[in-house]
Image (cartoon, grey):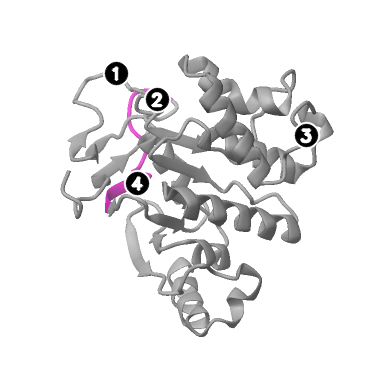
Amino acid sequence: MNAAAPLLEIDGLGKRFPSRDGRSMSPWVIQNLSFSVKDGEFVTIIGPSGAGKSTLLNMLAQTDAPSEGEIRFRGKPVREAGARLSPGLDCQIGYVFQDDTLLPWRTTIDNVLFPLEAQGRLDDASRARAETLMKAVGLNGFERYYPHELSGGMRKRAALIRTLVYDPPIILMDEPFGALDAQTRVQLQEDLLRLWEAGRKTILFITHDIAEAIALGDRTLVLSRAPTHIIGDHSIDIPRPRNLRDIYAVPQFAGLYETIRAQVQ
Protein backbone atom coordinates (compact mmCIF):
# COMPACT_ATOMS: atom_id res chain seq x y z
CA MET A 1 0.00 0.00 0.00
CA ASN A 2 1.14 3.50 -0.80
CA ALA A 3 2.36 5.11 2.42
CA ALA A 4 0.19 8.15 1.70
CA ALA A 5 -2.98 6.14 1.03
CA PRO A 6 -5.67 6.12 3.75
CA LEU A 7 -6.02 3.04 5.91
CA LEU A 8 -9.80 3.49 6.14
CA GLU A 9 -12.10 5.28 3.68
CA ILE A 10 -15.79 6.06 4.16
CA ASP A 11 -17.44 7.14 0.90
CA GLY A 12 -21.03 8.40 0.66
CA LEU A 13 -22.19 6.34 3.63
CA GLY A 14 -25.90 6.29 4.41
CA LYS A 15 -28.10 4.44 6.87
CA ARG A 16 -31.82 4.17 7.52
CA PHE A 17 -33.89 1.49 9.21
CA PRO A 18 -37.16 -0.27 8.44
CA SER A 19 -40.16 1.41 10.02
CA ARG A 20 -42.09 -0.34 12.79
CA ASP A 21 -44.76 -1.55 10.40
CA GLY A 22 -42.08 -3.10 8.19
CA ARG A 23 -43.65 -1.66 5.05
CA SER A 24 -41.49 1.45 4.67
CA MET A 25 -38.14 2.93 5.67
CA SER A 26 -37.36 5.48 8.34
CA PRO A 27 -35.88 8.88 7.43
CA TRP A 28 -32.13 8.83 6.85
CA VAL A 29 -30.11 8.66 10.09
CA ILE A 30 -26.81 9.10 8.20
CA GLN A 31 -26.55 10.31 4.61
CA ASN A 32 -23.69 11.18 2.27
CA LEU A 33 -21.06 10.85 5.00
CA SER A 34 -17.48 10.72 3.70
CA PHE A 35 -14.05 10.91 5.33
CA SER A 36 -10.78 8.99 5.46
CA VAL A 37 -8.35 8.01 8.21
CA LYS A 38 -4.59 7.54 7.90
CA ASP A 39 -2.65 4.67 9.39
CA GLY A 40 -1.78 5.49 13.01
CA GLU A 41 -4.09 8.50 13.18
CA PHE A 42 -6.14 9.29 16.30
CA VAL A 43 -9.47 10.72 15.14
CA THR A 44 -12.08 11.95 17.58
CA ILE A 45 -15.71 12.28 16.50
CA ILE A 46 -18.23 14.55 18.15
CA GLY A 47 -21.80 15.53 17.39
CA PRO A 48 -25.21 16.17 18.95
CA SER A 49 -27.26 13.42 20.59
CA GLY A 50 -29.07 11.34 18.00
CA ALA A 51 -26.49 12.06 15.30
CA GLY A 52 -25.87 8.36 14.66
CA LYS A 53 -22.37 8.17 16.13
CA SER A 54 -22.83 4.64 17.48
CA THR A 55 -24.59 3.62 14.27
CA LEU A 56 -21.53 4.79 12.33
CA LEU A 57 -19.19 2.70 14.49
CA ASN A 58 -21.45 -0.34 14.12
CA MET A 59 -21.19 -0.07 10.34
CA LEU A 60 -17.40 0.34 10.51
CA ALA A 61 -17.20 -2.69 12.82
CA GLN A 62 -19.29 -4.75 10.38
CA THR A 63 -22.03 -5.46 12.92
CA ASP A 64 -24.51 -3.52 10.79
CA ALA A 65 -24.69 -2.89 7.05
CA PRO A 66 -24.88 0.53 5.35
CA SER A 67 -27.97 1.35 3.35
CA GLU A 68 -25.76 3.06 0.78
CA GLY A 69 -22.14 4.02 0.23
CA GLU A 70 -18.92 2.09 0.73
CA ILE A 71 -16.32 1.42 3.41
CA ARG A 72 -12.80 0.54 2.23
CA PHE A 73 -9.96 -0.90 4.30
CA ARG A 74 -6.49 -0.70 2.74
CA GLY A 75 -8.14 0.33 -0.53
CA LYS A 76 -10.54 -2.65 -0.75
CA PRO A 77 -14.27 -2.72 0.06
CA VAL A 78 -14.91 -4.40 3.41
CA ARG A 79 -18.08 -5.98 2.03
CA GLU A 80 -19.27 -6.72 -1.45
CA ALA A 81 -22.92 -6.02 -2.29
CA GLY A 82 -25.13 -8.77 -0.88
CA ALA A 83 -22.30 -10.45 1.04
CA ARG A 84 -22.66 -11.42 4.69
CA LEU A 85 -21.30 -9.13 7.37
CA SER A 86 -17.92 -10.00 8.86
CA PRO A 87 -17.98 -8.54 12.42
CA GLY A 88 -14.58 -7.17 13.35
CA LEU A 89 -13.36 -7.72 9.78
CA ASP A 90 -11.43 -10.88 10.70
CA CYS A 91 -9.92 -9.26 13.83
CA GLN A 92 -8.76 -6.20 11.90
CA ILE A 93 -11.10 -3.92 13.85
CA GLY A 94 -11.36 -3.79 17.65
CA TYR A 95 -14.29 -2.23 19.49
CA VAL A 96 -14.30 -0.70 22.99
CA PHE A 97 -17.89 -0.11 24.08
CA GLN A 98 -19.50 2.37 26.45
CA ASP A 99 -19.90 -0.43 29.00
CA ASP A 100 -16.88 -2.55 29.87
CA THR A 101 -18.74 -5.83 28.99
CA LEU A 102 -16.39 -7.91 31.16
CA LEU A 103 -17.56 -11.46 31.78
CA PRO A 104 -18.43 -11.60 35.51
CA TRP A 105 -17.36 -15.23 35.97
CA ARG A 106 -13.85 -14.64 34.60
CA THR A 107 -10.94 -13.00 36.41
CA THR A 108 -9.27 -9.87 35.08
CA ILE A 109 -6.51 -11.78 33.30
CA ASP A 110 -8.98 -14.30 31.90
CA ASN A 111 -11.16 -11.48 30.58
CA VAL A 112 -8.14 -9.85 28.95
CA LEU A 113 -7.06 -13.13 27.35
CA PHE A 114 -10.54 -14.10 26.16
CA PRO A 115 -10.22 -12.69 22.59
CA LEU A 116 -6.94 -14.56 22.11
CA GLU A 117 -8.57 -17.78 23.30
CA ALA A 118 -11.51 -17.26 20.93
CA GLN A 119 -9.11 -16.66 18.03
CA GLY A 120 -6.92 -19.66 18.89
CA ARG A 121 -3.92 -17.34 19.32
CA LEU A 122 -3.19 -17.76 23.02
CA ASP A 123 0.47 -18.66 23.59
CA ASP A 124 3.38 -17.64 25.80
CA ALA A 125 4.14 -14.56 23.70
CA SER A 126 0.56 -13.27 23.82
CA ARG A 127 0.38 -13.94 27.56
CA ALA A 128 3.54 -11.91 28.03
CA ARG A 129 2.06 -9.07 25.95
CA ALA A 130 -1.07 -9.11 28.11
CA GLU A 131 1.00 -8.92 31.28
CA THR A 132 3.03 -6.01 29.88
CA LEU A 133 -0.10 -4.08 28.92
CA MET A 134 -1.74 -4.70 32.28
CA LYS A 135 1.35 -3.45 34.07
CA ALA A 136 1.38 -0.33 31.86
CA VAL A 137 -2.08 0.68 33.13
CA GLY A 138 -1.58 -0.34 36.75
CA LEU A 139 -3.51 -3.61 36.74
CA ASN A 140 -0.61 -5.77 37.85
CA GLY A 141 -1.57 -7.38 41.15
CA PHE A 142 -5.23 -7.51 40.15
CA GLU A 143 -4.95 -10.37 37.66
CA ARG A 144 -7.02 -12.80 39.77
CA TYR A 145 -9.70 -10.32 40.80
CA TYR A 146 -13.22 -10.65 39.42
CA PRO A 147 -14.98 -7.68 37.79
CA HIS A 148 -17.17 -6.96 40.83
CA GLU A 149 -13.99 -6.56 42.89
CA LEU A 150 -12.58 -3.84 40.63
CA SER A 151 -13.27 -0.10 40.54
CA GLY A 152 -14.99 1.40 37.50
CA GLY A 153 -11.67 2.75 36.24
CA MET A 154 -9.99 -0.64 36.58
CA ARG A 155 -12.80 -2.31 34.66
CA LYS A 156 -12.39 0.24 31.85
CA ARG A 157 -8.63 -0.41 31.78
CA ALA A 158 -9.24 -4.14 31.54
CA ALA A 159 -11.69 -3.61 28.66
CA LEU A 160 -9.16 -1.45 26.82
CA ILE A 161 -6.34 -3.97 27.29
CA ARG A 162 -8.65 -6.80 26.17
CA THR A 163 -8.90 -5.04 22.79
CA LEU A 164 -5.25 -4.02 22.51
CA VAL A 165 -3.92 -7.47 23.37
CA TYR A 166 -4.90 -9.04 20.04
CA ASP A 167 -3.34 -6.12 18.16
CA PRO A 168 -6.02 -4.97 15.68
CA PRO A 169 -4.86 -2.20 13.29
CA ILE A 170 -8.04 -0.15 13.91
CA ILE A 171 -9.72 0.45 17.27
CA LEU A 172 -13.22 1.94 17.55
CA MET A 173 -14.10 3.52 20.90
CA ASP A 174 -17.68 4.51 21.73
CA GLU A 175 -17.61 7.03 24.60
CA PRO A 176 -15.56 4.64 26.76
CA PHE A 177 -14.94 7.14 29.57
CA GLY A 178 -18.29 8.94 29.62
CA ALA A 179 -19.66 7.54 32.90
CA LEU A 180 -16.53 8.07 35.00
CA ASP A 181 -15.69 10.80 37.49
CA ALA A 182 -13.43 13.59 36.25
CA GLN A 183 -10.23 12.42 37.96
CA THR A 184 -10.55 8.80 36.81
CA ARG A 185 -11.42 9.99 33.32
CA VAL A 186 -8.21 12.03 33.00
CA GLN A 187 -6.15 9.12 34.31
CA LEU A 188 -7.67 6.82 31.69
CA GLN A 189 -7.14 9.39 28.95
CA GLU A 190 -3.48 9.52 29.94
CA ASP A 191 -3.27 5.71 29.93
CA LEU A 192 -4.86 5.59 26.48
CA LEU A 193 -2.50 8.18 25.00
CA ARG A 194 0.54 6.47 26.49
CA LEU A 195 -0.51 3.13 24.99
CA TRP A 196 -1.40 4.73 21.66
CA GLU A 197 1.93 6.56 21.42
CA ALA A 198 3.74 3.27 22.10
CA GLY A 199 1.87 1.32 19.41
CA ARG A 200 0.36 3.98 17.11
CA LYS A 201 -2.86 2.13 16.37
CA THR A 202 -5.50 3.86 14.29
CA ILE A 203 -8.24 5.03 16.67
CA LEU A 204 -11.72 6.42 16.02
CA PHE A 205 -13.00 7.77 19.34
CA ILE A 206 -16.60 8.91 19.87
CA THR A 207 -17.20 11.50 22.57
CA HIS A 208 -19.72 14.14 23.65
CA ASP A 209 -16.95 16.11 25.39
CA ILE A 210 -15.33 18.80 23.22
CA ALA A 211 -12.35 19.15 25.55
CA GLU A 212 -11.75 15.39 25.40
CA ALA A 213 -11.99 15.43 21.60
CA ILE A 214 -9.33 18.15 21.38
CA ALA A 215 -7.07 16.69 24.09
CA LEU A 216 -6.85 13.24 22.53
CA GLY A 217 -7.12 13.65 18.79
CA ASP A 218 -4.91 14.38 15.81
CA ARG A 219 -8.17 15.44 14.12
CA THR A 220 -11.69 16.07 15.29
CA LEU A 221 -14.65 15.40 13.00
CA VAL A 222 -17.91 17.20 13.78
CA LEU A 223 -21.18 15.53 12.80
CA SER A 224 -24.38 17.37 11.92
CA ARG A 225 -27.82 16.53 13.19
CA ALA A 226 -29.66 13.79 11.31
CA PRO A 227 -29.39 13.08 8.45
CA THR A 228 -25.81 13.05 9.65
CA HIS A 229 -22.84 14.17 7.57
CA ILE A 230 -19.49 15.83 8.29
CA ILE A 231 -19.76 19.58 8.97
CA GLY A 232 -16.29 20.09 10.46
CA ASP A 233 -12.86 18.51 10.08
CA HIS A 234 -10.32 20.11 12.41
CA SER A 235 -6.61 19.37 12.62
CA ILE A 236 -5.50 19.52 16.28
CA ASP A 237 -2.14 21.25 16.06
CA ILE A 238 -1.25 20.82 19.75
CA PRO A 239 2.21 19.21 20.07
CA ARG A 240 2.59 15.73 21.55
CA PRO A 241 3.12 14.46 24.16
CA ARG A 242 0.31 16.47 25.75
CA ASN A 243 -0.24 17.38 29.37
CA LEU A 244 -3.97 16.66 29.61
CA ARG A 245 -4.29 18.27 33.02
CA ASP A 246 -3.20 21.63 31.58
CA ILE A 247 -4.76 21.27 28.13
CA TYR A 248 -7.07 24.27 28.73
CA ALA A 249 -4.03 26.56 29.03
CA VAL A 250 -2.60 25.64 25.62
CA PRO A 251 -2.88 28.67 23.30
CA GLN A 252 -4.62 26.74 20.49
CA PHE A 253 -7.24 25.22 22.78
CA ALA A 254 -9.71 28.09 23.22
CA GLY A 255 -10.09 28.81 19.50
CA LEU A 256 -10.60 25.16 18.62
CA TYR A 257 -13.08 24.71 21.45
CA GLU A 258 -15.23 27.67 20.40
CA THR A 259 -15.19 26.68 16.72
CA ILE A 260 -16.26 23.11 17.46
CA ARG A 261 -18.85 24.20 20.04
CA ALA A 262 -20.48 26.51 17.51
CA GLN A 263 -20.72 23.66 14.98
CA VAL A 264 -22.11 21.17 17.50
CA GLN A 265 -24.83 23.61 18.54
- Is 55 in front, or is 117? 117
What segment carries the magenta color?
A: 21-35
Q: Quadrant of residue 56?
A: top left
The nearer-to-camera label among 2 and 3 is: 3
Q: Which residue is mark 1?
A: 84
Direction from residue 192 to residue 78 in the image, left or right: left
Query: How far is mark 1 from mark 2, CA to CA?
Result: 9 Å
- The reply to whether discs 4 and 2 touch (Cβ–Cβ < 8 Å) is no
Marks 3 and 1 sit apart, C-alpha to C-alpha, by 40 Å
Identify which residue is drawn at 59% across, 24% down: 113
Q: Is there a contact, CB below 8 Å, between mark 2 and mark 3?
A: no
Q: How far across and down, in percent of the image, does residue 97 sit?
A: 56, 38
Q: Earlier along the polypeptide chain: callout 1 or callout 4?
A: 4
What element does badge 4 sit on?
strand
Dot 3 crowding, Cα within 10 Å, few <14, some 14–19, many 20+: some
- Per the picture, the main secondary structure of the magenta-coloured stretch is loop
Report if the CB atoms under discs 1 and 4 are less than 8 Å apart.
no
Q: Nearer the viewer, mark 1 or mark 4?
A: 1
Q: Which residue is mark 3?
A: 142
Q: Nearer the viewer, mark 3 or mark 1?
A: 3
Between residues 124 and 46, which one lies in front from this camera angle?
124
Q: Which residue is mark 2?
A: 87
* Dot placed on the residue nearer the N-terminal end, 2 or 3: 2
How far apart are labels 4 and 3 at the CA level?
42 Å
Q: Amino acid at mark 1?
A: Arg
Q: What is the three-letter code of the residue carrying label 4?
A: Ile
Q: Which quadrant would the N terminus be assigned to in this image?
A: top left
Is residue 18 among the parts visible in the rendering?
A: no
Q: Could you tell me the amino acid type at mark 2?
A: Pro
Any mark on residue 101, and which? none
- The tag on residue 30 is 4
